[in-house]
Image: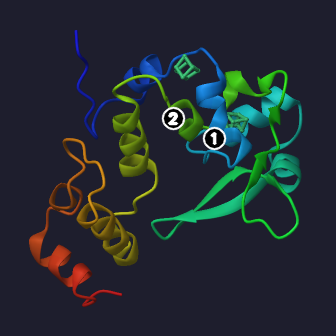
Amino acid sequence: MIKIITKNTPLKEVLELAAPCRCNSCNHGCKFGSGSLAGDDAKNIANFLGVSEEDLKKGFLEETELFNKKLLRPKLIREKGKPYGRCVFFDDEKGCTIHEVKPLECKTSIQCKDYGEELSVWFMANHVVDTNDAESIRQYAQYIKSGGKLIEGAGIGQLVPDREKLRKMLEYGIL
Ligand code: SF4
Ligand code: SF4
């Protein structure tokens, strides 16, 4: 049966679609970046590594920003002068060394399935775009305008159903 992923697809179903396997296709991104954490990820990764959440954040995570939202992701080991780098948890031989508890964005980045892109939009719509932040909504509107992939329930009018509020957000009536 073909599974249709919408914004309201529950996390449990999304995780069932997030394949437990690992291969170079999915690992490729780990050499140039890392995926953002959501929900209980920090707690679970800290438990897995046997460190406190505070030490995890200090030693292994860094802040990133997407759609005007501050998120945490595994630190990147950058070569001098380069904005990108490999994930601190990536090992050339073993791949992801926290595979069992890797961040939700990593779990929803699936390269070989036709629903992979939909899972990425699900992550963005549920865990990144902040519907109470006008700047976040404006940046998401820009993403859609430039041809970004959409899934059912994640349209801008569905995220902000109050049309007047949405108009004000988009026209900078709400900063
Ligand atoms: S989901 Fe596909 S591309 Fe990703 S690790 Fe599994 S087999 Fe490889
Ligand atoms: S946490 Fe694991 S899957 Fe995610 S970017 Fe790092 S090595 Fe890759």
Q: Which residue is mark 2?
A: 109
Circle 1: is it few (<14), some (14-19), or many (20+) Cα within 10 Å?
some
The N terminus sits in image quarter: top left
Q: Tell me which residue sits at (28%, 41%) in the image.
A: 7
Q: Is residue 8 left or right of residue 102?
A: left
Q: Ligand 1 shows up in which quadrant of the image? A: top right
Circle 2: is it few (<14), some (14-19), or many (20+) Cα within 10 Å?
many
Does label 2 or label 1 sit earlier along the sequence? 1
User: Amino acid type of disc 1?
Assistant: Gly
Find the distance from the CA under tag 2 to the CA under tag 1: 9 Å
- Compared with 172, 40 (above or below) is above
On the image, the x and y values in percent for residue 150 come to 25, 47
User: Which residue is at the front of the view, 24 or 169?
Assistant: 24
Dot 2 falls on a residue whose secondary structure is: loop
Disc 2, ligand 2: is the CB inside 8 Å? yes
Q: Tell me which residue sits at (45%, 49%) in the image.
A: 127
Q: Is residue 159 left or right of residue 92?
A: left
Q: Which residue is mark 1?
A: 29
Q: Are marks 2 and 1 in contact (CB under 8 Å)?
A: yes
Instruction: Place residue 171 in its image quadrant.
Output: bottom left
**Which residue is farthest left?**
163
